[in-house]
Amino acid sequence: MIQSLRNGDWGRRVKSWFPDREFFMRSEGQVRFITISSRVQMAMAGAVLAALLAWGGSMGAMAWSSYSDAANRASLIDREAKVASSEERVAAYRKDIGQVRDDLERRQSFLEDMVASLPADVKSSGKVSDSTGEAAKTVSKVSMAVPEAKGLAQMEARQLALVERLTHFADWRANRAAAALKKLGLDPKRVLNKVEHEAMGGPLERPSTDANGGMDPRFERLGLSLARMNALEQGLAGVPQVVPAHFTRISSTFGFRRDPFTGGGAMHKGLDFVAPKGTPILAAAQGTVTFVGQIRGYGNVVEISHGNGLSTRYAHMSAFHSHVGEKVSAGEVIGAIGSTGRSTGPHLHFEVRINGRAVNPRPFLEQAPDVLKEVHSVPQRISQ
């Protein structure tokens, strides 16, 4: 009952919006009256409302269609980008198999140069990027489009797999070297920075992996990873790691001590190894001899630069067995123990310097052998 009354009220309210309307028109001296009933007005209003709703619906449909088309285009572009390399290779194979062969030979030469620069104990495992899907798609498409080029496509796929394995190895080994440098209190970033700013030069020879001089980013990534690995391992090889003499005891450590001549306090910036006169003195790490001669207080001295700001000093020598500019290996004889300079008896005064500042040699000599052993503990080989 209440609902029916409400419906009746609603109908009367709507009808009140459209009361009967009467218009008059004058034509040739005559007056005509035109009456438009509420029913006709409501019908006309309904028609207009329906037209507006239809127009709004069509505009919404057009907007959705435009959005859908844009989304589809974006998806298509994304799909095209993912298969662009394989599509391009198919076109290249179809156009000129000989040219593709030349490209693959260039890639092979690049890989051989990279592999030749690796240490002997190399093993590759895992992946940095994953071109497996792309390579399989390329082989499939090439096989269907240019059957005679199937073998070349398979060779290219193997090359990409090798590049990714070698890149993973280089990154893994570089990270191990960086961790070892940190254990020894050295900053890997400084090591890399030193390498980048050392004196170097030569003609500019840009590597390429295709006839147009372009470089596949995966190959470039491999080259950069190997360069980083070599720089960090070179820095690690220059860390003092060999005790520089066969000694009977250490008479003085690094730090504050009582001076043997004045009896007062003084700073001692090295380690004193006591041994008989003439005992061989050994290079603590590989490097280049930068000084052979006398320094006040030190007597006869040999200094070796190990790169990356690291150097070692050997003092109070009785004899020299090295010369400036000589490349020496870790453990190589460079002189003999003596008592020249400010010395109370035969011994070797040994210093380690970083960027010219003397630091305690003991952590290097005690930790470096174990750290290096850990770094090189896993026997490795190159595998394809």
Image: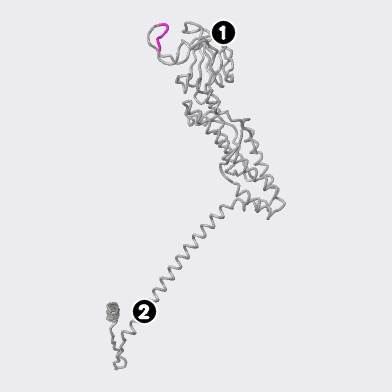
Q: Tell me the number on the disc at residue 278.
A: 1
| Helix, strand or loop under label 2 | helix
Which quadrant does the N terminus fall into?
A: bottom left
Locate residue 273, reporting x and y percent. 50, 12
Q: Amino acid at mark 2?
A: Gly
Most frequent secondary structure within the magenta stretch: loop
Q: Position of residue 280 (x, y in %)?
A: 57, 12
Measure the C-alpha gap from mark 2 to mark 1. Answer: 118 Å
- Over which residues does the magenta segment extend? 257-261
Q: Examine the rendered structure and indicate whether residue 185 appears above or below residue 255.
A: below
Q: What is the x, y in percent for residue 159?
A: 64, 42
Binning the other alpha carbons within 10 Å of mark 2 as few (below 14), some (14 to 19) or many (20 upward) gives: few
Chosen colour scheme? one colour
Element class at badge 1: loop
Do the CB atoms of the residues marked 2 and 1 lie less than 8 Å apart?
A: no
Q: Earlier in the sequence, mark 2 or mark 1?
A: 2
